[in-house]
């Protein structure tokens, strides 16, 4: 479970101090699915970076399962990310010279998995997202939707507790968007993940159980009663 307490993040922009996050309190339970929305520059990605241990707050606590990420050393944060948190980004972030299977295997290298185990687990992860026939394909040989599926497989192959997604459908057309959301929602249910996603897409937000809106560093959370 996440517990954010009075999380503040300030940046200096010239002579101006920007409050990307301003005293944010937020609880996210195990297995929760939360969508984060808000205007550009409102603090959405900053919040996701805090949850992923990619950035630290100026003030406050970001507690994951009893551990305050803000107080960990960089090496320990790297371990937490490698073991517990999967990331999916808008730009896929695949290595162009590696096959789909090799791209997925990269997530297992920091965990010390043996080569045979890495290959087997990567192949199974790709099959789980519908790419069992694309193991040997390079990113350039796949569509945008297929590349994002590879990125999802890479995020999930290490069996994380948390999946963080930053605009994962932002580069996709509507049909591809729906396919990727189907994959993400199925993985959330099957694996019991805590799934937190930043999106500007209101159609996606309407289907989420909880929606957090950030404006000028402040957050409001509502339960979504839509079917």
Image (cartoon, rainbow, N blue to C red):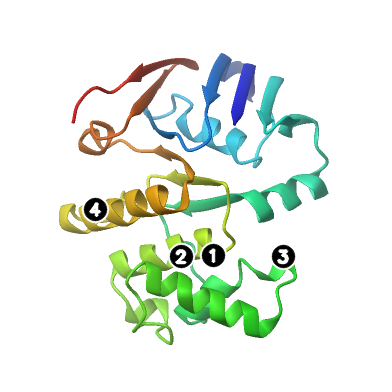
Label 4 and label 3: CA atoms lie apart by: 31 Å
Residue that badge 3 annotates? 111
Q: Which of the two labelled residues, at mark 1 and mark 4, occupies the earlier sequence position?
A: 1
Question: What's the residue at 61%, 23% (across, down)?
Answer: 3
Left or right position of 94 against 190: right
How many residues crowd mark 3 within 10 Å: few (<14), some (14–19), many (20+)? few
Q: Would you identify the image quadrant in which residue 58 lies?
A: top right
Earlier sequence position, callout 2 versus callout 3: 3
Mark 4 or 2, nearer chain start: 2
> In the image, which disc is placed on residue 221?
none
Of badges 4 and 3, the one in the foreground is 3
Left or right of residue 7, residue 88 in this image? left
Whether residues under marks 1 and 2 lie with C-beta atoms below 8 angstroms apart, the answer is yes
Where's residue 199, x and y in %?
Answer: 34, 38
Q: Nearer the viewer, residue 153 or 53?
A: 153
Q: Which residue is mark 2?
A: 153
Label 2: few (<14), some or many (≥20) within 10 Å?
A: many
Tell me whether circle 3 and circle 1 mark residues in contact (CB < 8 Å). Answer: no
Residue plotted at (27% across, 53% down): 182
- Mark positioned earlier in the residue sequence (3 or 1): 3
Where is residue 100 shown, x and y percent of the image? 45, 77
- Counting the numbered discs, the total is 4
Circle 4 or circle 2, nearest the eye: 2
Q: Callout 4: 10 Å neighbours few (<14), some, many (20+)?
A: some
The residue identified by callout 1 is 157
* Residue at mark 3 to residue at mark 1: CA–CA distance: 11 Å
Quadrant for the N terminus, please.
top right
Q: Does the residue at mark 4 contact the one at mark 3 (Cβ under 8 Å)? A: no
- Give the spatial CA distance, label 1 vs label 4: 22 Å
């Amino acid at each position: 479970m996440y517990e954010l307490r009075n999380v503040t993040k300030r940046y200096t922009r010239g002579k101006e101090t920007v409050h990307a996050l301003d005293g944010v309190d937020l609880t996210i339970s195990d297995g929760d699915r939360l969508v984060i929305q808000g205007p550009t520059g409102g603090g959405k990605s900053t919040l996701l970076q805090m949850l992923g241990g990619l950035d630290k707050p100026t003030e406050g606590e970001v507690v994951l399962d009893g551990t305050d990420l803000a107080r960990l050393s960089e090496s320990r944060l790297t371990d937490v990310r490698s073991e517990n948190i999967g990331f999916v980004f808008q730009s896929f972030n695949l290595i162009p010279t590696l096959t789909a299977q090799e791209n997925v295997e990269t997530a297992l290298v920091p965990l010390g998995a043996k080569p045979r185990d890495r290959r087997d687990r990567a192949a199974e992860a790709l099959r789980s997202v519908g790419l069992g026939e694309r193991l040997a394909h390079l990113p350039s040989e796949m569509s945008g939707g297929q590349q994002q599926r590879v990125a999802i497989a890479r995020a999930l192959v290490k069996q994380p507790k948390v999946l963080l997604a930053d605009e994962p459908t932002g580069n996709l057309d509507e049909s591809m968007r729906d396919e990727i959301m189907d994959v993400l929602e199925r993985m959330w249910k099957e694996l019991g993940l805590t799934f937190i996603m930043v999106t500007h897409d209101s159609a996606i937000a309407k289907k989420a159980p909880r929606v957090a809106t950030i404006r000028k560093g402040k957050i409001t959370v509502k339960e979504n009663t839509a079917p």
